[in-house]
């Protein structure tokens, strides 16, 4: 494939402007913010805040980036690859605080807060999760009551304390707080969002706010804290109503209409939907980077099996099969994720279909990314243990994201349950044997699995008993994956890129092989067909390996910027150089 072909493949895989992606690589690799092994956790936290301010200075208005989704996703992606300590900060600053203020209230009311967030003179954060409800924030207990000209926020009991937000470092803070609005009549009007200055310009906690920093975290650098409120006063204009309701001078809330009442909670959590996709995107980026580093290393690392036999590591079956199937799954999820990103830009963030599509994407993408990063680290052996080679640090980002913005399995099971209800009544294909050598038959096998799971889940959806709600969860999770896999495969059918066609074949065959027992028991494959699939998968893996250089080049990584010693052709010299730089010799 020529240069134009490489560029076309890179364009196919990238979401957003090439220029902005390249600019972010340069900004986020600034040596002034290099993390070293001499830094304490406290120093790394402070370094992350300094790097965030530098990022804001270099790329401009926080509000503009927060509301330009391709740019927002790119900031998440490259932070995950090059500056993992930034991920907890950019999520709160760009997405949750700035995004909410920019979209859920009037410009005049948001202006004083957005102005400070725009240049990072204040750092943004959102306070939703609590000890008692976790990420199931519809059950939060923090209250906001009317006091005549504004609101008073209180933590009614210890289980209502806000748990986990990164606010330990004493810097100026603008926060968006989730609380139940209790109106003047004592009626609970559900969860609403309010803006507050959690810390003043000197970093001191605001009157009525108690902040306690939590313990050391081994996987990711965060200044997690527990926050409680005792009569924290916020202005009337601090209410993020999204124009769905009004509150009069007596503290009485009036909804615009019944539809507004129903949209209120989805509106309050709308930026969580953006955040879930942003974190899914950055985990996909981490997975691509991990594979790039591990596969480049595997193609040159010689393994002396005997005095005569010295294959490269990629020739070892367990390395080859694992990393290449992970590669196929990651590329497929990149394409799928990009399609969801494009849809999100023109979607109503409060609409159920939008919310469910992103919940599905989170479950489909993030768990696979963790597996991919884990496999890459392990297959790199001892080299995978060191931050210098980057992959080990991606594990922390994966773990943080998978339980951030709602746990993957919870969201996957909820979305799968919604899908099962929506797809009820669709005809299930008759059991018949399929020929896996036929690409069309592979598509039908994907579809048959999706529709069969839908049918089998119905027995638990007829009632709302706790027993059935729990029993349907495994099937809902299976459906979430099956549906996304089928949709993703469909996106690749008309590709003109031979590399993507090779990815498609590995992805499809590996999916069917992994679910072979299910297909056998449902009469869709026989034992001979399963054997055929295994043979075809081996051939498809070999074919994808032939396309490996072009595919890795299309990821758009720069070896010098990544700086991983394993990317060097002279590994000892690369480590010597790094050790000298670290120790100042």
Image (spheres, rainbow, N blue to C red):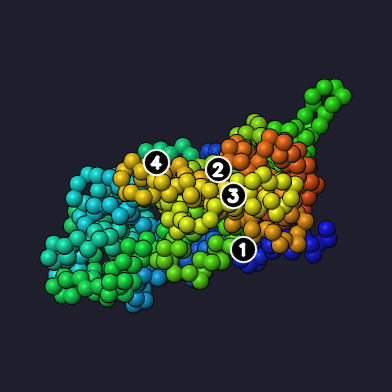
Foreground disc of the pair 4, 2: 4
Q: Is residue 450 visible?
A: yes
Question: Quick one: 452 or 335, which is closer to the camera?
Answer: 452
* Mark seen at residue 151: none
Q: CA distance from mark 1 to mark 3?
A: 39 Å
Mark earlier in primary sequence (1, 4): 1
Mark earlier in primary sequence (1, 3): 1
Mark earlier in primary sequence (4, 2): 2
Residue 195: where, in percent of width, then height?
30, 64
Q: Residue at x 51, y 57 (%)?
A: 426
Residue 169: where, in percent of width, then height?
38, 50
Q: CA distance from mark 1 to mark 4?
A: 39 Å
Whether pointer 4 and pointer 2 mark residues with C-beta atoms closer than 8 Å, the reply is: no
Q: CA distance from mark 2 to mark 3?
A: 36 Å
Location of residue 111 with respect to 396 vertically, above or below: below
Location of residue 124 with respect to 549 vertically, above or below: below
Determine the secondary structure under disc 4: helix
Whether pointer 1 and pointer 3 mark residues with C-beta atoms closer than 8 Å, the reply is: no
Mark earlier in primary sequence (4, 3): 3
Q: Which residue is denoted by mark 2 in the rendering?
A: 370
| Mark 3 closeness class: few <14, some 14–19, many ≥20 residues within 10 Å | few
Q: Which residue is denoted by mark 1 in the rendering?
A: 15
Q: Which residue is denoted by mark 4 in the rendering?
A: 471
- The mark tally for this picture is 4
Q: Residue at x 19, y 60 (%)?
A: 188
Foreground disc of the pair 1, 3: 3
Q: Which residue is denoted by mark 3 in the rendering?
A: 430
Q: Residue at x 40, y 70 (%)?
A: 102
Residue 17: where, in percent of width, then height?
63, 67
Name the quadrant of the C terminus. top right
């Amino acid at each position: 494939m020529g240069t134009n072909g490489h560029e076309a493949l890179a364009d196919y895989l990238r979401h957003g402007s090439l220029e902005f992606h390249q600019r972010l690589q340069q900004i986020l690799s600034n040596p002034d913010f290099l993390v070293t092994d001499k830094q304490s956790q406290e120093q790394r936290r402070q370094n992350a805040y300094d790097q965030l301010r530098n990022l804001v200075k270099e790329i401009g208005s926080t509000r503009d980036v927060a509301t330009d989704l391709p740019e927002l996703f790119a900031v998440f992606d490259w932070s995950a690859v090059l500056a993992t300590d930034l991920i907890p900060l950019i999520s709160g600053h760009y997405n949750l605080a700035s995004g909410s203020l920019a979209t859920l209230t009037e410009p005049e009311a948001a202006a004083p807060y957005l102005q400070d967030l725009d240049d990072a003179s204040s750092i943004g954060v959102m306070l939703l999760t609590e000890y008692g409800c976790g990420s199931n924030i519809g059950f939060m207990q923090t209250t906001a009551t009317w006091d005549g000209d504004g609101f008073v926020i209180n933590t009614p009991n210890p289980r209502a304390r806000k748990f986990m937000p990164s606010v330990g470092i004493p810097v100026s803070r603008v926060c968006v707080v989730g609380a139940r609005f209790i109106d003047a009549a004592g009626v609970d009007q559900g969860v609403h969002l309010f803006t507050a200055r959690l810390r003043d310009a000197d970093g001191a906690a605001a009157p009525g706010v108690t902040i306690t920093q939590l313990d050391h975290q081994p996987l990711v650098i965060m200044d997690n804290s527990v926050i409680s409120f005792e009569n924290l006063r916020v202005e009337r204009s601090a209410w993020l109503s999204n124009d769905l309701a009004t509150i009069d001078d007596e503290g009485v809330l009036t909804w615009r209409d019944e539809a507004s009442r129903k949209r209120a909670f989805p509106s309050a959590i709308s930026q969580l939907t953006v955040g879930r996709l942003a974190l899914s995107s950055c985990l996909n980026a981490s997975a691509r980077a991990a594979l790039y580093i591990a596969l480049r290393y595997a193609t040159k690392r010689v393994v002396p099996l005997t005095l005569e036999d010295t294959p490269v590591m990629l020739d070892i079956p367990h390395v080859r099969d694992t990393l290449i199937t992970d590669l196929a799954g990651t590329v497929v999820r990149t394409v799928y994720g990009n399609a969801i990103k494009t849809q999100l830009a023109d979607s109503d963030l409060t609409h159920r279909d939008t919310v469910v599509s992103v919940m599905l994407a989170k479950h489909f993408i993030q768990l696979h990314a963790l597996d991919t990063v884990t496999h890459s680290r392990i297959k790199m052996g001892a080299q995978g243990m060191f931050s210098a080679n980057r992959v080990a640090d991606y594990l922390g980002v994966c773990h943080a994201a998978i339980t951030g913005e709602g746990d993957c399995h919870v969201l996957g099971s909820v979305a799968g349950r919604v899908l099962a209800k929506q797809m009820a009544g669709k005809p299930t294909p008759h059991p018949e044997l399929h020929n896996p050598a036929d690409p069309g038959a592979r598509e039908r096998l994907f579809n048959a699995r999706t529709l069969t799971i839908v049918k089998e889940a119905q027995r638990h959806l007829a009632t709302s008993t706790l027993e059935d709600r729990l029993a349907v969860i495994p099937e809902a999770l299976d459906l979430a994956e099956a549906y996304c896999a089928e949709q993703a495969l469909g996106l690749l059918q008309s590709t003109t890129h031979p590399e993507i066609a090779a990815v498609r074949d590995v992805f499809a065959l590996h999916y069917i092989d992994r679910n072979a027992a299910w297909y056998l028991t449902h009469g869709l494959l026989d034992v001979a067909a399963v054997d055929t699939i295994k043979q075809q998968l081996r051939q498809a893996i070999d074919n994808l390996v032939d396309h490996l250089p072009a595919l890795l080049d299309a990821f758009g990584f720069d070896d010098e910027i990544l700086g991983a010693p394993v990317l060097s052709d002279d590994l000892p010299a690369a480590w010597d150089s790094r050790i000298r730089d670290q120790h100042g010799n």
